[in-house]
Image (cartoon, rainbow, N blue to C red):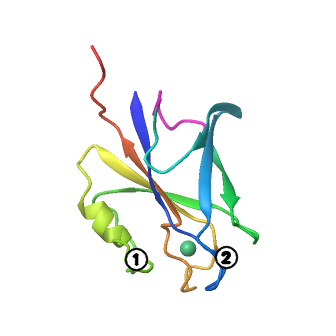
Amino acid sequence: MIELMYLLSDFQCGASAPKAIISADIYRHGTLIANNLSVGDKVMLQDMDGVTFSYNLQYGGCEVSPLSKTLSKTDPIPNLPGAYSQASLQDHLNGLKHYEQLYAVEIGTHNENSSYYDLQDIVFIINNNPLLPD
Ligand SMILES: [Ca+2]
């Protein structure tokens, strides 16, 4: 089993828009298995095989197109500053345990050269070694 925790979301449609409140639905091979997750929520999964996500934005107001990467502690990442006062993606990676991964999502752009491309609009932690109850 693995544990997926919704770590953070930080996205707004343009500088003057309010910060979007983003909930996540999780599917496995197309079947809904968890819905309306908020930041801080955790869900147990068999593994990440066939797992997909959809996101619902409150105060969205713009087209979004999710692009995700699964990153382990030692994966090289582009040097991306954290938006506003957030920790950077590298800071989050540095803080991972060896059995954890980040599932990092960019929803604003697919252009890696854009200043909006920070891969931390939505971030989950994948815990590949959760402490299972007795
Ligand atoms: Ca972004």
Residue located at (54% from left, 86% from top): 115
Quadrant holding the C terminus = top left
46 vs 122: above or below: above
For disc 1, the marked residue is: 82
- Of 54 and 41, the residue lying toward us: 41
Quadrant holding the N terminus = top left
Q: Position of residue 15 (x, y in %)?
A: 61, 85
Q: Position of residue 116 (x, y in %)?
A: 56, 81
Foreground: disc 2 or disc 1: 2
Which stretch appears magenta? 44-52
For disc 2, the marked residue is: 13
Residue 45 is one of the magenta-drawn residues: yes
Q: Locate ligand 1 by image quadrant.
A: bottom right
Determine the image quadrant of residue 30. Answer: top right
Q: Could you tell me which secondary element the residue under label 2 belongs to?
A: loop
Measure how far apart labels 2 and 1 are at the Cα level.
17 Å
Tally the marks.
2
